């Protein structure tokens, strides 16, 4: 994957999986050094400090890796009500129900008031 | 990623993240149809029913996806003591401690007795 590793972000208290992102070596180093989860954005092709715009940063509590170091599991304290830029607590807000994806929870915040017109 | 989607596997009771795998469309369809997590193995370039050799299958309880459907979160009941072929309950058995990866838990089973000489 062009030097990118999958990073699973999990709330350290509730155990809820909040999002999946990608890191390159620099993003991983920044994450460890700063204590805030930093990803590599494939769409923008640059480093991305999660919460840069919204203030909803992810404070790293614990980092684990799997046997061949192809993925990271990062447990965090999420600052702010949600990590999803659509206003949900978790990016995984859609569940498969009877063969269709259904939104399975209420929004935790109003994305318009956080991101303005720039999502 | 060549039609592959990241699948995060989480224990539905404990909330522990057990592993990260990849699915193509066929693997996803099999997972939904059979109720057992089925991945696409990038190293073997074919479908892989988790637990085929060990019997440690993953019974699907719930499937969620993120906003752009780039990842799946699958909550499972894990049959058997562990998902990691090295004998651990979770593939994420190594933690970053003072800048080095350290094994952070005991083995849950003896991989030799499950897999024999074929890992």
Image (cartoon, coloured by chain):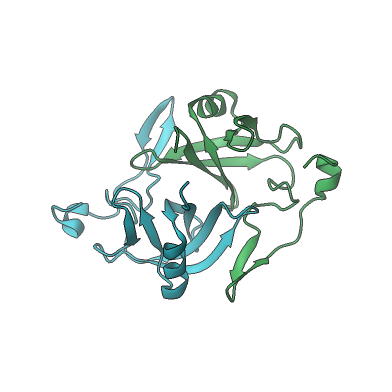
Chain colours: A cyan, B green
Q: Is residue B106 left or right of residue A80?
A: right
**Residue A50 falls in which quadrant of the image?**
bottom left
| Residue pictured at 43% horizontal, 30% vertical | A97
Q: Is residue A114 left or right of residue A91?
A: left
Instruction: Give the x, y percent position of residue B107.
Output: 76, 57
What is the quadrant of the N terminus of chain B in the image? top left
Residue A75 visible, this orientation: yes
- In the displayed orientation, state which residue is furthest to the bottom: B98
Q: Nearer the viewer, residue B105 or A48?
A: A48
Instruction: Give the x, y percent position of residue B44.
Output: 64, 34
Number of numbered discs on residues: 0
Instruction: Give the x, y percent position of residue B84.
Output: 69, 48
What is the quadrant of the C terminus of chain B in the image? top right
Depicted B118 relative to depicted B102: above or below: above
Depicted A33 relative to depicted B84: above or below: below
**Residue A51 falls in which quadrant of the image?**
bottom left
Residue B11 visible, this orientation: no
Q: Nearer the viewer, residue A72 or B56?
A: A72
- In the displayed orientation, state which residue is furthest to the front: A2
Instruction: Give the x, y percent position of residue B68.
Output: 34, 40
Q: Nearer the viewer, residue A95 or B95?
A: B95
| Residue pictured at 53% horizontal, 57% vertical | A73
Depicted B5 relative to depicted A7: above or below: above
């Amino acid at each position: 994957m062009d030097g990118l590793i999958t990073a699973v972000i999990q709330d350290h208290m509730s155990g809820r999986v909040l999002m999946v992102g990608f890191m390159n070596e620099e993003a991983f180093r920044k994450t460890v050094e700063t204590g805030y989860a930093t990803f590599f954005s494939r769409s923008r092709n640059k480093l991305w400090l999660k919460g840069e715009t919204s203030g909803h940063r992810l404070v790293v509590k614990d980092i684990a890796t799997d046997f061949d170091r192809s993925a990271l599991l990062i447990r965090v304290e999420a600052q702010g009500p949600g990590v999803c830029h659509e206003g949900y607590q978790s990016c995984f807000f859609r569940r498969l129900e009877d063969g269709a994806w259904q939104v399975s929870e209420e929004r935790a915040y109003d994305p318009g008031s956080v991101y303005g017109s720039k999502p």
